[in-house]
Structures are given as structure tokens and as C-alpha cells.
Amino acid sequence: MKGRKFSILIFIFGILFVLLTSSCSKSSEKNKDLGGKDMVLEQLSMPKEGEEIAVINTNYGDIKVRLFPEAAPKAVENFKTHAQNGYYDGVIFHRVINDFMIQGGDPSGTGMGGESIWGESFEDEFHVYYHNLKGSLSMANAGPNTNGSQFFIVQSSNIDENTLSQMRNAGEEGGFPESVTEAYSLLGGTPWLDFRHTVFGQVFEGLEIVDEIANVKTGPGDKPVDPVIMEKIEILEFK
């Protein structure tokens, strides 16, 4: 287990090195806000000591997630409050599609239920340097500004060259800075969900658990035959 965690950390640091090198060749200035070419590195960075993280305890193992309150404050507040109030305890991942995503957060387990902590839908929160890369934690919705309690974790590892080419052509003005496209090329993800689904976290440990869940046998509606359960979501300080 220790060897696996070490390998995951080495993999993450390798990605960060490539992205940092790419960004630094264009700018030597340090970003001081939510903008700038290094922002994608913030999405993939490990949490800092004392930072709040989420630990999704499942019957397959733990998934640890870094949260992004600066980029998506309402989505993070909603998720944290629900977690701390036990709203997600015992809730299943009701929709699982291999090489796409795993979705949960609906207490009814049907994909039709759940609500925000405010009792009504809340608005989307998008940012040009936070994207649906593999491992991102994003809000599920039924259209623009319809966020409630449901969320998903992106599990897709592959992006075809044609899509990457379109992202390169779009560039920063089209929502895909070079460093973001490079991250997609290295990690995979679901860029067609960008600017449609709020990204408010990123898995930094337990991505192998996400992959394992994504490979379970499913039935009608992409629902796992054997329940995949979120036993509890803990909000903890990273140490």
C-alpha cells in the first residue's frame, strides 16, 4: 500500500514538473490571484498543511479530494455543509460509466433527487484554469445554474488527438490555455463538460479507487448491480 501511494505521488510530481516547465518558459512572474498561466498547476497541486480536504469513505476504499473554495465558493460550501451534516452518509454512487465518470450525492439513489443546503438550485461557477481533468470533482446538474447536491468524479483517461487539436486552436480566448490542454493530454478528462459543470475539487489520493468503482458491473441506467456506498464524507485538515 505504501509503495502504491509513493508511486502515485511520483506520478503527480512528474506531471507538475512538466506543466511548470511549460508555464515558466512563457512567464517568470508569480501569479497572485486566480488568473494566470500557472493556475492549472493549482488544480493539480497537493494540499497545503492545514488546508481543508474531503475524504470520501466508500465500501471500496477512501478517496481524498482537495477543494477549491476560491474558485467555486458556493459549490464548496454546499458540499462541505452537506458532508458535515451527514447528508451523504450511506448514499450510493447511482451512476457509473467506465472511462467517463462516477456520480453520486442523491439521497434517493435515483439520480432524480437531492437539493442544495439553501433548498434551491444555485448558480454555476466557472474558471478558465479549472477544468474537468481526470480526478476532478464537479457538480452534476440538469442544465445551467441548476446545482443541488449531486456531484461526479471524472474518470476518463483518454482524449483523442482531434479534440486536443480543437482545444489548441481555441487557445486561452476560447477557454483552453496551452497549459490546460497539456494537462488534458497527460491526464485525460472530459473537456466537453467544461463551462457546463462547476469544478470544485480534485482527487489527490485514491484515484485507483475511482478506477475500481468505474469498472463495477452495472445494470439499467448505469447503476451498479452491487451498491457502491459512500459510507461517510469527512472534512479534515490536511497534515
Image (cartoon, grey):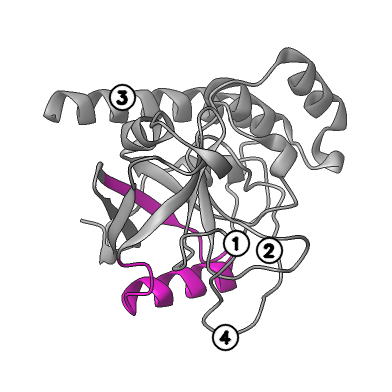
The residue at which mark 2 appears reads as 125
User: How far separated are the C-alphas under marks 3 and 2?
Assistant: 31 Å
| Residue 26 visible | no
Q: Which residues are magenta?
A: 62-89
Numbered mark located on residue 224 in the image: none
Placement of 209 over or under 71, stated as above or below: above
- Left or right of 45, for residue 118: right
- Where disc 3 sits, the SS reads helix
Q: Position of residue 228 (x, y in %)?
A: 34, 47
Is mark 4 in CB contact (under 8 Å) with mark 2?
Answer: no
Left or right, 202 with reference to 145 = left
Mark 2 touching mark 1, by CB under 8 A? yes
Circle 4 Cα neighbour tier, 10 Å, few/some/many (<14 / 14–19 / ≥20): few
Q: Amino acid at mark 3?
A: Ile
Q: CA distance from mark 1 to mark 4?
A: 19 Å
Name the residue beneath numbered marker 4: 118
Q: Which of the two discs, 1 and 4, labels the residue nearer the N terminus?
A: 1
Within the magenta stretch, is there residue 117?
no
Question: Horizontally, is 187 left or right of 177 in the view?
Answer: left
Q: Which residue is mark 3?
A: 10
SS of the residue under disc 1: loop
Label 1 packing within 10 angstroms: few (<14), some (14-19), many (20+): many
